[in-house]
Image (tube, grey):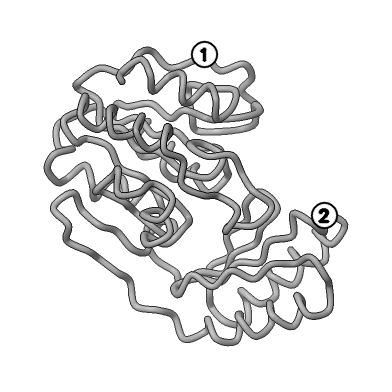
Amino acid sequence: MRRALPPPGPLTKDVALFLDLDGTLAPIAQAPSGVRPDASRNALISRVRAFLGGKIAIVSGRPISDVDRILGGSVAAIAGIHGLERRAASGRIFTAPAHHGLENARAAFERLANIENGLIVEDKGLSIALHYRSVPRAQDEIRARARQLAEETGLSLQEGKMVVELRTPGFDKGDAIAAFMAEAPFSGARPIFAGDDLTDEHGFAIVERTGGEGVLVGAARRTHASRGLADVDAVHAWLETAA
């Protein structure tokens, strides 16, 4: 296990910057709807975007529409739902077809939420998530049921911080970053990706393989990242090195 990862250096103009949202740019909330726009954060991101010549993208588990709601249009290039939908810097949108098993997964998660007060079902269209941050004692039962549903439906299971998600199989965050790096304005730049969760490991792996750096936000754990920052405030301070 890697410990005490060194912090990333100051951002330079040759960087293509990829950022997760929850737990990286914004603190994690009890419910997804609890993360709201923040004028100072969005102004900071706009300044970083200008410094990097537009070479910044958000790579999130949220749908693109929700990222836009929170960031107020400060970033053009966004990968949503862990890469299952992607908007290029040009504005072109790519979306995977929804898997037929999502309806069964949605119904199963809603039944669990009706039984256990405090569970939150989040329907993202191409995936369905069950948040149990308010009911941590139910973790083992929820994870076991999610694994069973993945086998029954053919959906991919993605586990995160106090959440299980059943998603359309296909693109992940690493695939999304690779696709961005093949396009303007990112092509030829040095990629850096900052994220906090297990869902970000595909992204860390791809940037490390292509000569860039992964930046793990939060406590040390086994990771593909080679750099680390303590929390959201540390991420903002790092971004200020460019802004």
Query: Which residue was labeled with disc 1?
Result: 6
Q: Where is residue 185 shown, x and y percent of the image?
A: 13, 39
Left or right: residue 194 versus residue 10 is right
The C terminus - image quarter: top left
Label 2 environment density (alpha carbons within 10 Å; few <14, some 14–19, many ≥20): some
Q: Where is residue 136 shown, x and y percent of the image?
A: 82, 54
Residue at image coords 15%, 37%: 187
Above or below, comparing residue 43 to residue 172 in the picture:
above
Query: Which residue was labeled with disc 2?
Result: 136
Outermost residue to the front: 39
Q: Where is residue 176 shown, x and y percent of the image?
A: 32, 51
Residue at image coords 28%, 34%: 46
Residue type highlighted by circle 1: Pro
Query: Which quadrant of the structure image shows residue 193?
Result: top left
Instruction: Between residue 99 and residue 48, name the one nearer to us.
Output: 48
Q: Label for residue 126? A: none
Q: Secondary structure at mark 1?
A: loop
Left or right: residue 15 versus residue 174 is left
Q: Where is residue 101 shown, x and y percent of the image?
A: 52, 84
Residue at image coords 77%, 77%: 112
